[in-house]
Image (cartoon, rainbow, N blue to C red):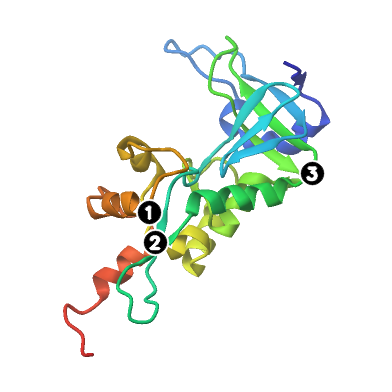
């Protein structure tokens, strides 16, 4: 696995992990050594809307601070089309992957990977292609949502704007990805939209604006 130590590129991405800058303090108040960081750079394949694969290094990197629909997941367009009462399914997982793939294209991707002093921890990182923060790009298009609101400056504002404008998944009824992972039995690409429609009917949380819109509708309407 080819992972170079932090160089000039890391200086541009240093604000990605403010929690690492000052190190940590142990239970007796002693200042521990700050966590190290490494970079992974090169061509990357897009696995889904929040995951990259670097084949040359054989490393999979999850974009830090965001989450997106899983590849087999569906959401639903609340807009009525003609006389049909069935909601139109939207392949939110496939669309999230497509947007990330568009942002990456054939560009060289550079990821800043926090590494703990013991060398442990999940392989997550702040990744950029052509100087563009990929996670921020996904938030701006509405095909990802925050997992850690203060991971980088601008993330929360980007999500708020996309949500208000109903970009991407924010225009649909969508099950939160964490809840989907817990409840979905079939996670293959053969999954049918009706399976996610059934999960929405027994949802535990509501993350997208159309749910709010539905609650504001009058109980009865004239034809």
Q: Residue at x 42, y 52 (%)?
A: 74
- Residue 60 rendering spot, x and y as whole percentages: 62, 27
Q: Is residue 21 visible?
A: no
Residue farthest to the left, as pictured: 219
Identify whether 58 is placed above or below 11: above
Q: Are marks 2 and 1 in contact (CB under 8 Å)?
A: yes
Reading the image, the residue beneath label 3 is 106
Earlier sequence position, callout 3 versus callout 2? 2
Q: Quick check: 29 left or right of 82?
A: right
Local packing at callout 3 (Cα closer than 10 Å; few below 14, some 14-19, many 20+) is few
Q: Are marks 3 and 1 in contact (CB under 8 Å)?
A: no
Residue farthest to the front, as pictured: 190
The answer for how far apart the CA atoms under marks 3 and 2 are is: 31 Å
Q: Residue at x 40, y 77 (%)?
A: 81
Q: Is residue 109 visible?
A: yes
- Residue 177 rendering spot, x and y as whole percentages: 41, 44
Earlier sequence position, callout 3 versus callout 1? 3
Earlier sequence position, callout 2 versus callout 1? 2
Reading the image, the residue beneath label 2 is 76
Task: Determine which of the numbered discs, if any, sits on residue 193 in the image.
Answer: 1
Q: Residue at x 21, y 90 (%)?
A: 222
Judging from the image, what secondary structure is the residue with disc 2 in?
Answer: strand
Q: Of 220 and 151, which appears nearest the observer?
A: 220
């Amino acid at each position: 696995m080819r992972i170079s130590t932090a160089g000039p590129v890391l200086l541009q991405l240093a604000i990605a992990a403010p929690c690492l800058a000052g190190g940590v303090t142990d239970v007796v108040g002693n200042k521990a050594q700050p966590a190290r960081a490494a970079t992974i750079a090169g061509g990357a394949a897009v696995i889904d809307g929040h995951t990259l694969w670097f084949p040359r290094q054989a490393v999979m990197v999850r974009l830090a601070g965001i989450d997106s629909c899983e590849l087999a997941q569906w959401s639903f367009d609340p807009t009525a089309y003609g006389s049909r009462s069935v909601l139109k399914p939207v392949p939110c997982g496939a669309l999230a992957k497509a947007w990330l793939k568009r942002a990456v294209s054939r560009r060289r991707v550079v990821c800043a990977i926090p590494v703990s002093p013991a060398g442990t921890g999940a392989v997550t990182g702040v990744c950029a292609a052509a100087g563009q923060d990929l996670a921020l790009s996904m938030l701006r298009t509405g095909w990802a949502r925050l997992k850690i609101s203060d991971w980088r400056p601008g993330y929360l504002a980007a999500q708020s704007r996309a949500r208000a404008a109903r970009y991407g998944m924010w225009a649909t009824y969508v099950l939160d990805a964490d809840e989907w992972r817990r409840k979905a039995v079939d996670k293959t690409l053969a999954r049918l939209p009706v399976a996610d429609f059934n999960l929405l009917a027994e949802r535990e949380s509501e993350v997208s604006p159309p749910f709010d819109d539905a609650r504001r509708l009058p109980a009865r309407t004239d034809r």
